[in-house]
Amino acid sequence: MQVSIETTGGLERRMTIVVPSDSFEKQITQRLKDAAQRARLDGFRAGKVPLKEIRRRFGRSVRQEVAGELMQHSFFEAVQQEDVAPAASPSLEVLNMSPGNDFEFTATFEIYPHVGLGDFSIIEISRPTAEITAADLDAMVEKLREQRKSWEPIERGAQDGDQVKVGFVGTLDGESFEGGSGEDVTFVVGQGQMIKDFEEGVLGVTPGESTGFDATFPEDYQAENLQGKTVHFEVTVNEVGEPRVPELDGEFFAAFGVSEGGLEAFRSEIEDNMTRELTAAVRSQVKRQVLDALEQTHEVQLPAAMVAREVTGLREQMMQQMTQYAQGRNTPQLPDDMFTEEARRRVKVGLIVNEIIGSAGLEADADLVRERIEELAKPYGQPEQVVSWYYSNEQQLNQVQMAVLEDQVVDHVLERAQVEELASSYEDIVAGRTLAHPQDDDHQHDHDDGAVDESESGSA
């Protein structure tokens, strides 16, 4: 087999591969002989069809089949022979596969770029630090009680903080409008689930009572036809529920897996969970800084095929999310430009991380992998079974190993970078406020609109 390789521009290479004719034809002949043993043709006994007849009938298709397989196999051998690392699958083109001639084809592909690692000592990292205080623990306990509150029906006028169930009909200039009516719509007064004037309109209304009022939609309301418009609503309050938070008793503790030890054991369990959450938040925020710094301090030529593959993955992920929320409506096709910048960043960081792994000889530390899996298993009732599941599931285990290895890369960089500890609080760290990273804020507040509840109550 003869191999030649040329640079066609940037990271793209064109490899020309020539396989001797006798080798190519030998494989074709053997494939035809195998076919003759299985062929059942009219006028011939089974397994007795002459090779000449088999070649006449099937020679062209068998030649193409063998050529396709030979290109894949020969390309694999050629890249090993030439010591090149393709960044993606090649584009294959046959130049000559005529009988009696050497089989010749080209493979065009991009190679992985050279990544020259920079000076990690110029990287500056802020590591948030905090202690979990008694006040933090008290606040978390109250938050958990609030999350499990119930609503006790009550015969009085609705107040701020009550949950109400209403039916309503809205009219704009005397006419009904899309989304302007609803039945058995439930919301908590004062939490911004409905527009402000609507929530204020039901204050003081008792169960079974009806009322009417005007409500003005905000100027920035999402439905453009209602922005700044005043609508009249006729509303019937069907139910009023007063909030009741659970007592700190055995039943409440058992809901969090604490069956013995009372309040002290419960608080200890919650503090352990908060510690894990704090540790994970710090690790995530420091890791984000390190990866951002690596991206900003390195110049890397990116294989277009890798970027395209990442764009496809990001688009598919977004489409899946959109489909979940579309509720049967058609979802729009999303252009590549929406994802190209993030795809390029991910590919670049991945190449740099892989270079660090290779140059530093890093391997996933088995003890750290075990520690991470046990950490993931802790919140479950039978953590030992969860640990066993991870170790019996190759895909899940690989994901943990890769996460640990990436953390080892971060530690490798941190050992050489300038790290400043930044005193903060538990609440600010887990909320992402300590470092005030704009992108972190975006992720933290994905569902922070809070202005209205369109899911159940239409436009109101």
Image: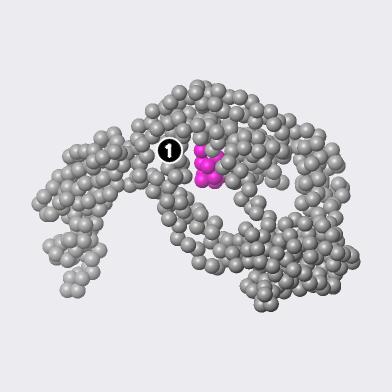
Q: Is residue 432 visible?
A: yes
- Residue 298, x across and y down, in percent: 42, 31
Q: Which residue is drawn at 75% across and 33% down?
A: 132
Where does label 1 land, which residue?
Answer: 348
Near mark 1 (Cα within 10 A), the count class, few <14, some 14-19 or many ≥20, is many
Residue 16 position, x and y percent, is 20, 43
Query: Quadrant location of residue 191?
Result: bottom right
- Magenta residues, start to end: 392-402
Residue pictured at 65% horizontal, 28% vertical: 422
Instruction: Name the quadrant containing residue 378.
Output: top right
Q: Nearer the viewer, residue 159 or 61?
A: 159
Instruction: Check the image and name the residue furthest to the right.
Output: 155
Reply yes or no: does residue 167 show up in magenta: no
The quadrant of the rendering that contains the C terminus is bottom right
Magenta stretch, overall SS: helix
As rendered, which of 74 and 155 lies closer to the eye? Answer: 155
Report whether 73 appears left or right of 264. left
Residue 400 lies within the magenta run: yes
19 relative to 321 in the view: left or right: left
